[in-house]
Image: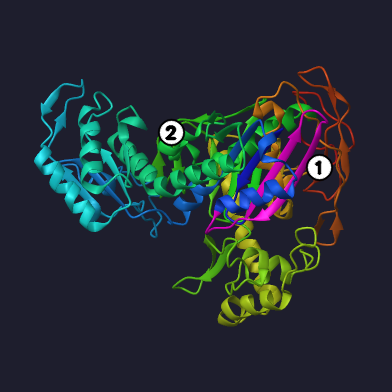
Amino acid sequence: MYVAVDIGGTFTDIAVHDPGTGRVSFHKVLSQRADLVAGVLQGIDDCEAGTESIAMLVHGSTIVINALVERDGAHTALVTTAGFRDVYEIGRINRPESFNLAFRKHRPLVPRSRIFEVTERMRHDGTVHTPLDENQARAVAQRLHDLQVEAVGIVFLHSYADPTHEERMAEILREGCGPDIFVTRSSELSREYCEFERTSTTAANAYVGPRVSGYLTDLQHRLDERGFRGELMLMQSNGGLCDVSTASRQCIQMVESGPAGGVRGTVELSRQLGLDRTIYFDMGGTTAKACVVRDGQADLSAQYFVGNYAEGLPVRVPVLDIVEIGTGGGSIAWLDEANGLRVGPRSAGAHPGPACYGAGGTLPTVTDAHVVLGHLSPTRFLNGRMPLDVDAAHHAIREHVGEPLGLDVVTAAHGILAIANAAMANAVRAVTTERGLDPRDFTLVAAGGAGPMHAVDVAVELGIGRVLVPRHPARSPPSACSPRTCGATTSAPISSGSTTPIRQGSRTCSRSWRSPVTPTSAGRTSNASAALICATSGRSTRSRCRSPGASTRPEHCPR
């Protein structure tokens, strides 16, 4: 039996595939922020998957990116070569937005007050210029112990050529601060020059390290207690897999772990439907993501920016070319100093969650706006297992947005969604227009729990003619961990889908699009199914599948 797990900021998704029967089952539970493992185990139990019968468990997660976007990481310090303390603060001396008077540089994850210098120096060829001053190193270790830091990143000049000084510094830190401190070295993350990028990558790994490594250790232990004897593999940002030991040390490799699974699923869905140009659009509870898939391949980048190029923090690890922003179903709507309405990046998460969850949340979110506008049924949410509080949603938007701006609740809710859609449209532009691609030539694949609710509006904003909604869009990251991804020899068919009309204004624009039966790599057949919507005209496309290389623009689309 193969199991896939994806932990989001709001929900945890489980997918179970039994290769003997071919049955695939899905389940969704609220993420338990205080005990993420409990949510995973509950989901496995709800799917009636015996832990002892699991051959492989593939795990994707948004823990890393959510911690970075929400600035919810460990109490972190950096140790660097004497004279280079300000590299992280200065960054690159460029101004991507020359005429933006409100432009601001990146905000470091580690303040200057927790960056310490140690006398040492390696040359670019790996020879020693100045030996490591171990007495000074021990003094720094004692200072960090007194500050009770949880994680330390070590970034010495030219350590990519010879990591000896970094390795010794790590030993001294563990001796002085105790074995529980999380220590990471730049030389085990990025073995190339560019001091700012190496520093930023190391700081990010240290910032999320205690949370991620602690979670993985706890997950492995509790699975073993239940009789788990299979393989536990983690989805990496480049679309590959790694073991727990590697993921616990190089946590930043999981920065786009959850979306990477969804991208792989989009690649496979595009192949089955004969689409050569698609855009993966995933909106979850905390963030929204976009990635381009062309000719059966997703672009891979050697560097990733947490935020954006102008103001974000660079992370120098191989990652699928995904752009991510802090806009999701749980993103909080708030007013800035100028009384302007903003949405995100702070999220209500699963606990207390949006006000409509009735779990103590009082701040208005994107989900509350949908409830106010009637887009979400208060009695059918999560298959009826989670009733929504409509009055709480109205009260939150009225108190925090409507009354301060002099707007009625409905208008305020529309405003929240409009700002969220505009932000997500910009994310799609970042992977298309800014790369020299015309988004109108692509099909938008809606994924994530909130993706299909916003996909048509985003498509209209960008002039995209078609929106494709998979059978299980809210479980797209786990669904990418089919037997093909998990290591089984056969490809699981996509289950046939039902179509839910998507309304834009007064128009209903939906149609079931079922592809012809297509052969899989194992010689079996599959019947791919999804809802296909003509976003720009409100009319569905013809119910036929195009061959690879054909135009992806619908026949009835005015563009």
Expressed as whole percent of the image width and height from the top left, the position of residue 356 reads: 68, 71
Give the residue at mark 2.
317
Give the residue at mark 1.
557
Judged from the image, the secondary structure of the residue bearing numbered disc 1 is: loop
- Which span is picked out in magenta? 11-35
Image quarter hosting the C terminus: top right
Residue 26 belongs to magenta span: yes
**CB contact under 8 Å: marks 2 and 1:** no
To which quarter of the image does residue 405 belong?
bottom right
Question: Which one is closest to the eye, mark 2 or mark 1?
Answer: 2
- The three-letter amino acid code for the residue at tag 1 is Cys
Mark-to-mark CA distance, 2 and 1: 40 Å
Relative side of 151 to 394, left or right: left
Q: Is residue 120 above or below residue 523?
A: below
> For the stretch drawn in magenta, what is the main secondary structure?
strand
Q: At 85% across and 53% down in the image, what residue appears?
A: 501
Expressed as whole percent of the image width and height from the top left, the position of residue 288 reads: 59, 50
Q: In the depicted view, which residue is nearer to us: 254 or 549?
A: 254
